[in-house]
Amino acid sequence: MRSPTDSASAPNTASTPLPSRDNAALAALAPWPDPQANKYTRGKLSLVAGAAAYPGAACLAGAAAERAGAGYTEVFCAGESLLAVRSFRPSLVVHDWREWHPARQEARCADRTGACVIGCGFDGDARQRELVAETVRAATGPVLIDGGAIGLMADKAGQRLARERAERGVGPLVLTPHGGEAARLARGAKLEGALGGPELAAGLARAYRALIVLKGPITFIADAEGIVETMDRGTAALAKAGTGDVLAGIIGALLAQGLAPRDAAALGCALHAEAGRAAAQELTEICVSAEDVIAALPQAVRAIVGAH
């Protein structure tokens, strides 16, 4: 497990965010497996995703997590989504999300690295709200909240859940909103004024006591201590449905492998962007899909991290 202290730790303010990390800094974070590694020591990612209407989100996030190095990726999804997810990728371990009990999962895996991603393909029903609340309360490893679950955090109850988790110190919380989701979180936290990208990311990080990955052409990564950094490798090729699920799977996999939250976000966002660029070079920015971004992840690893 890597140190909980992130690499780029120089103080800054939201108005002057740190620049994007260069390839050398990112390469130092790469979770190359130990020669004696097994699938559990390489990190277990639990992915709670895929409502009945959106099984594809669970498929994309799960496949991206495997490509990003997680040794064991399990998916908890709606019963109606089970067949689609199992058929998409046989290497994923797939359960009905009625079997998701984070406290029980943590007890069984106390000696292993791991993380949870929740929310890809959620559509906001009452059962999903219960899943989010239970996960934020009970999971002791890193938790990443994405997709429809972000909206379920965008009120006083969600903010209280996040802050209570931070006060207990049970594990880091990461939220990965796009602009619309960030605006909703801001309204829930009663952040006032028209905030620009870095200021909005910083304000949300303070309000929710979480690491915020504010996605966009330029992505801003902000933590609750006031450190904000940029990722400016984005491409319009990534402006397609499903690419956010891919990013959640990548960052979740890096968290499961022991990277500290800000490091996982920085490396994950850079790999995601570089994979988009590699796919666009072959297919054009018009033709790239989320599946193409997953397929291009090995090229992104070679471009940023190099060979090992």
Image (cartoon, rainbow, N blue to C red):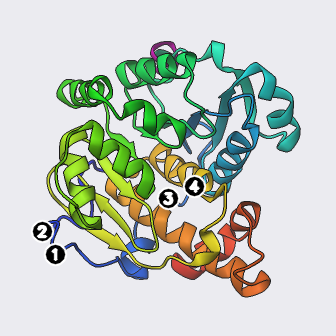
Q: Is residue 176 visible?
A: no
| Region rendered in magenta | 102-106
Residue 244's disc is 4
Looking at the image, is mark 4 or mark 2 earlier in the sequence? 2
User: Image check: 305 left or right of 194?
Assistant: right
| C-alpha span from label 4 to label 2 | 27 Å
**What residue do we see at 28% from left, 42% from top?**
187
Q: Give the residue furthest to the front.
A: 193
Callout 3 secondary element: loop
Residue 180 or 291: which is nearer the viewer? Answer: 180
Q: Which residue is mark 1?
A: 16
The residue identified by callout 2 is 12
Task: Please tell me whether mark 1 or mark 2 is closer to you in this view.
Answer: 1
Percent x, y for residue 79?
76, 19
Counting residues from the start of the chain, the first of labels 3 and 4 encountered is: 3
Residue type, label 3: Pro
Q: Quadrant of the C terminus?
A: bottom right
For the residues labelled 1 and 2, say whether their Cβ atoms are less than 8 Å apart.
yes
Write the residue at 44% across / 61% down: 215
